[in-house]
Amino acid sequence: MMEGTVEERLEALRETALGDFPGTDAGDETIIYVGTATCGRSSGSLEVVSAFEDSVKMLGIKARIIEVGCHGHCYAEPMAIVSKPGWPPIMYGYVTPNRVQSLMKRFFNDEDPALEWALGAMEENDLIPTVYETPRWAMEQRRLLKNCGAIDPENINHYIALGGYAGLANALNMEPSEIIEEMKKAGLRGLGGAGFVTGRKWYICRKVPQFPKYVICNADEGDPGAFMDRTILESDPHSVIEGMIIAGRAIGAESGYIYVRKEYPRAVSIMGKAVSQARELGLLGEDILGSRTCFDIKINQGAGAFVCGEETALMTSIEGKRGMPKPRPPYPANKGLWGNPTVINNVKTLASVSKILVHGSEEFASVGTENCRGTAVFALAGKIQNAGLVEVAFGTMLREVIFDIGGGTPPLIKTSQVAGEPSKPVKKKFKAVQIGGPSGGCLPDSLLDIPISFDTIMETGAIMGSGGMVVLDEDNCIVETSRYFLEFTQNESCGKCTFCRIGTKHMLNILTNITRGTGCMEDLDLLEELAATIKQGSLCNLGKTSPNPILTTLKYFREEYEAHILEARCPSLECKDLIAYYILPEKCQRACDACVGSCPTEAIYTRKDRLKAIDQEKCVKCACCIDACPAQYDAVIKISPICDLPESEPRDDTPSEEDKT
């Protein structure tokens, strides 16, 4: 059993940890970091780890291979950082087992670092960027994500060696009121979407003279396209645990829960191991670091209901009941889990707490805007070139996040069958960004020059949400996008509120009819009327915010709704009931059967003149034929048959008896 003050005990843990953590200077040992979070594993990072192990053994290299979390560059997975003595750490993207073998031979036999595979390498002057000087990271402010991809999340020593649990040590030497005051001065707001001032929430809970009290980490991340919380849990779990202990110290709680959805098996496994390791080192449980402070954590796995991201539904689920929202007030800080005072904070909020107590509230508040301090983490998904995680200061322009950091819409390159004639990449035009998840809103290009904050985003009709950003291009139909997100929230409705249960169903039916070309102009007024009613009458924010995608798209893209209704035409050619695929005879090559083999329903046949055509009755509009048609022919087109049918193409493409034979 360790003895001494809180600082002495933590310092003893740090001395042990430093011996287990390679840091930036590992002497004559090569350190290889491979990202093995969920995104990396899905791209084959475990096979990459095995390839590095084989290469190290084959070449006789003194090296250590460390499995780390997500670097945020999900578009370039699998990724690896090779830190060779005498060289700066170099980050490689799109790593494959075959590439590993070539890289290791060149780097260690020929002193050639293979910079053509390094992210951010400058070919014109052969400059080698350090890990944090890659073009994308150079534009970010990585605070919450600083440890992600830099430490082994399953080894607590890595976290401690980099200063982990120093914030807890400071908190144990502070009065609870002092901790809360630091949170207030820092201006930390809830990063799960609500934006409520964290220090204020803790103060309210602290003042309630009722025990026991609880701290809950809301890790029930359910937004389509969002994976910020999952990444932090998988890559830097102890930052969340440390924040929960500090919160418990501040409000007088001795017990906490991490509520994480079961669909995150990697996160559940890592968090369970992290809790056990913290408990073994005396950082959780009884008498933490000899301070007489007690706090322990349990992990509760949710069943994946989107509504359980709402705090009252989440607490009901922990209690073993069906996850359904409750009226507020009373708020959880006054009467929460099992009727006791409870603080519920998001993963990112809790991960920020320790950093405030280590670096000071003034340093934290020096970043961001007057009303939104610190940084925000976004998950870039959809039609974006550099998909992944981005951390920027509040106040950064949306355009900078999407185009400068995210790279804008990706170039589309179609294969060519002509040797030496690669097809030219085509970039689709940006249309909108869905921000704030399924309950957020679609913002057009004209609104991208606004600073990111809870208030400015809300003024547009959208919400910050937990940080999901889904980018849409010209091929995305705004009406179909709204229908998709509303279908999600309608399916996830718990059914408790009439307004949410029935109102969203009516809105979904209307949107479905519009995407089929059977809507009428009166539907648009009805959608707005229903949206206002649902916002006013729903019990929780799932229902109150569910009409946001429809309201924002009606506001900024009304002409697309009108095209569907007045012309039975989908301008983006996405709504299947309003499009058709045809093969242009003048472009079709008789000897090419690429489209025939690609069709899953055998809708493409050979006409009597040996040209190809599509049987419209069999066509399921999967677009396989367009993808298969070689770029130099470009014979398959997708059109609105009512408006855009070419004169050279017969309207009735059903094969004749002669064609069939």
Image (cartoon, grey):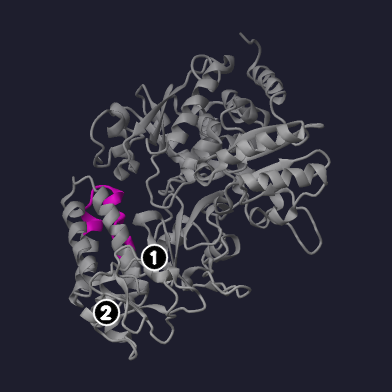
Q: Is residue 362 magenta?
A: no
Whether residue 148 is visible, yes or no, is no
Mark 2 Cα within 10 Å, few/some/many (few <14, many 20+)? Answer: few
| 281 w.r.t. 346: above or below | above
Q: Quadrant of the N terminus?
A: top right
The image quadrant of residue 531 is bottom left
- Residue type at mark 1: give it: Ser
- Name which residue lies at 44% across and 68% down: 628
- Residue type at mark 2: give it: Asp
Q: How many marks?
A: 2
Residue identifier under label 2: 659
Question: What secondary structure characterizes most of the magenta part?
Answer: helix
Q: Earlier in the sequence, mark 1 or mark 2?
A: 1
The outermost residue toward the bottom is 647
Q: Position of residue 517 (x, y in %)?
A: 22, 75
Mark 1 or mark 2, whichever is nearer to me: 2
Whether residue 401 is visible, yes or no, is yes
Q: Is residue 539 magenta?
A: yes
Residue identifier under label 1: 598
Q: Position of residue 510 (x, y in %)?
A: 20, 67
Q: Which residues are magenta?
A: 534-550
